Amino acid sequence: MQIFNRDGSLLNEDTTLTLREYLEIASSGISLAGADLHQTDLRYADLRYADLRYADMTNADLRCADLTGANLRRATLAGADLANVSLRQADMTDADLRRATLAGADLANADLTDADLTGADLTAASF
């Protein structure tokens, strides 16, 4: 798997690192566009300004992650646990958030244009 920094440079071509190791090494702005991250444990991950367009995060555990300013356009987050996540200024245009848990999430200035929130739990989420 190749992962790129925000400036387009290759972060690392070594496929022996785990996703968690990549996230610990990476600076803010990592590109995971189109990545298959379904059922991945991303609790407390620093994904500020990450490019997650078209990523499949179905049933992923993102509790307490920081997704401030992340690009989640057309990302699939169906059934994902996003409790207490920071999604401030995140772009979630056309994102699939069906049955996602967004309890306590910070969605201030987030763009939810055409996002599918059917069955999503927005208890105590702030906008």
Image (cartoon, rainbow, N blue to C red):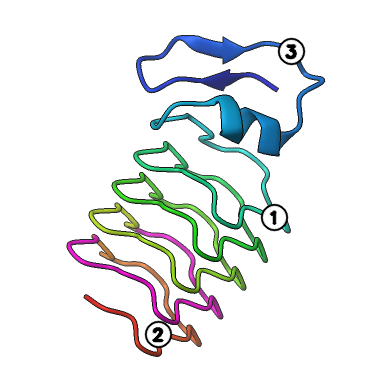
The span from disc 2 to disc 3 (Cα, nearest Å) is: 39 Å
The quadrant of the image that shows the C terminus is bottom left
User: What amino acid is labelled 1 in the image?
Assistant: Asp
Residue 93 is left or right of residue 60, and the answer is left
- Describe the element under mark 1 as helix, strand or loop: loop
Q: Which residue is mark 3?
A: 14
- Describe the element under mark 3 as helix, strand or loop: loop
Sequence order check: which comes first, mark 2 or mark 1? 1
Tell me the quarter of the picture where residue 110 sits: bottom left
Q: Which residues are magenta?
A: 94-110
Q: Which residue in the rendered view is the most extreme toward the right?
A: 16
Residue 94 is left or right of residue 23, and the answer is left
Q: Residue at x 38, y 49 (%)?
A: 73
Residue 61 in the image: x percent, y percent? 64, 63
Residue 32 is left or right of residue 50, and the answer is right
- Describe the element under mark 2 as helix, strand or loop: loop
Q: Which residue is mark 1?
A: 41
- Above or below residue 19? Residue 88 is below
Total marks placed: 3
Q: Which residue is mark 2?
A: 122
- Above or below residue 44? Residue 70 is above
User: What amino acid is labelled 3 in the image?
Assistant: Asp
The span from disc 3 to disc 1 (Cα, nearest Å) is: 21 Å
User: What amino acid is labelled 2 in the image?
Assistant: Leu
